[in-house]
């Protein structure tokens, strides 16, 4: 089974505008909303890829109910812990030049009981050989060591963990040596204290190699339009980004995590994991819903993925 954990779900609200005026009045058009947050996006993509997952997390208020309704309608199994307060709404603004500005809320404060309930639920559900995806931000009063401690406990049960997080959540999380991590360029630079504008790709790859030497089985470094690098103990593969019409870049990284989780569960060879991840991410760019396209689209895109094997 694949379990996705979304500590801080969101209703993602998309709106178009001509130009974003900082400090001024902005009139929004073509507003649409859907259930989001990184783990939920991963579950949505897994479903599109023909897999099954259970989405768990912390959810509250009328926005939370809306999210659960949408998941139910999509046939995505979910088992959320109810919290006080309203789940956040994240505003994504797309201007006439297709620039994306994201205004992500903090999310409601979580009481200790709800957090403990989620942890107990996860530990009760996850069994040996399962894959658990820990991704996204957490509400501000949840300890930044949460992914680290969950990962440590899951590893004791022989559960494989895919971690996609930023800042301290990432820094502490990787201490527990998850099976797979998927930083993007910005996240890895933040972790390294490196300047994003000047850092060389080779330096980033060396850092991924060090993380693998330290015990992480697979590091997926996603580089936006520059594609991605996949580093494991035995292999180093690079893949160019596919050229597709971009409708929305939100959820491309989540589609990649979904593909990696599915490939891990199905024990795909590395090259197949790379192709599925790249195709899933590209298909997500082509859709509005922050998730992969349908299976036919992903299969067609997989054939276009160029994998450059640097090792072995
Ligand atoms: N502008 C783009 N053009 C082509 N491919 C892209 C673009 N942005 C993202 N992708 C694809 O989606 C993957 C994940 O995107 P990225 O921006 O690196 O991650 P995240 O969404 O986690 O920030 C990339 O590795 C790439 O394959
Ligand atoms: O584009 P990505 O990185 O795959 O993730 C998109 C998702 O992440 C969010 O931006 C939330 O991110 P955070 O949890 O880091 O605040 C959601 O609004 C959105 O659904």
Image (cartoon, rainbow, N blue to C red):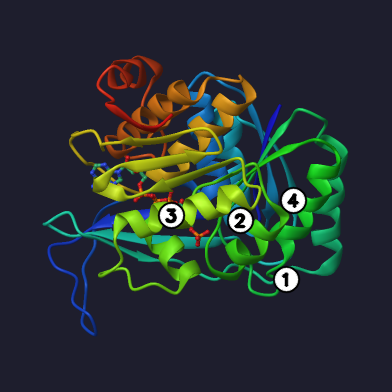
Residue 151 — which label? Answer: 4
What residue lies at 45% left-to-right and 74% top-to-bottom? 193
Residue 217 — which label? Answer: none
Q: Secondary structure at mark 2?
A: helix
Question: Does residue 171 appear left or right of residue 242 in this picture?
Answer: right
Cα–Cα gap, marks 2 and 1: 26 Å
Cα–Cα gap, marks 1 and 4: 14 Å
Q: Secondary structure at mark 4?
A: helix
Q: Is residue 273 visible?
A: yes
Snapshot quadrant of residue 289? top left
Which of labels 4 and 2 is toward the front? Answer: 4
Seen in the picture, residue 84 relative to 278 is either above or below; the reply is: below
Seen in the picture, residue 16 relative to 20 is either above or below; the reply is: above
Mark before the other along the chain sequence, 1 or 3: 1
Residue 62 — which label? Answer: 2
Quadrant where the N terminus sits is top right
Which of labels 2 and 1 is toward the front? Answer: 1
Q: Is residue 37 visible?
A: no
């Amino acid at each position: 089974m694949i379990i996705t954990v979304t500590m801080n779900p969101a209703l993602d609200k998309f709106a178009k505008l001509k130009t974003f005026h900082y400090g001024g009045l902005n009139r929004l058009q073509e507003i649409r909303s859907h259930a989001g947050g990184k783990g939920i996006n991963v579950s949505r993509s897994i479903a599109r890829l023909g897999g099954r997952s259970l989405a768990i997390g912390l959810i509250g208020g009328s926005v939370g109910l809306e999210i659960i309704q949408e998941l139910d309608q999509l046939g995505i199994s979910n088992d959320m812990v109810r919290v006080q307060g309203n789940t956040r709404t994240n505003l994504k603004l797309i201007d006439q030049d297709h620039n994306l500005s994201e205004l992500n809320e903090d999310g409601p404060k979580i009481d200790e009981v709800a957090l403990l309930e989620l942890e107990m639920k996860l530990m009760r559900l996850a069994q040996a050989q399962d894959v658990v995806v820990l991704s996204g931000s957490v509400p501000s009063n949840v300890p930044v060591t949460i992914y680290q401690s969950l990962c440590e406990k899951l590893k004791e049960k022989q559960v494989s963990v895919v971690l996609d997080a930023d800042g301290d959540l990432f820094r502490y999380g990787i201490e527990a040596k998850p099976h797979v991590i998927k930083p993007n360029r910005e996240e890895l630079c933040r972790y390294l204290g490196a300047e994003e504008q000047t850092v060389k790709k080779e330096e980033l790859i060396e850092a991924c190699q060090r993380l693998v030497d330290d015990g992480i089985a697979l590091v997926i470094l996603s580089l936006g339009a520059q594609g991605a690098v996949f580093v494991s103990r035995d292999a180093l593969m690079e893949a160019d980004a596919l050229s597709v019409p971009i409708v929305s870049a939100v959820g491309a990284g989540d589609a990649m995590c979904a593909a990696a989780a599915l490939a891990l569960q199905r024990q795909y060879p590395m090259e197949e994991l790379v192709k599925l991840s790249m195709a899933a991410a590209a298909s997500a760019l082509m859709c509005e819903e922050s998730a992969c396209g349908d299976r036919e689209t992903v299969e067609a895109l997989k054939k276009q993925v160029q994998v450059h094997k640097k090792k072995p």
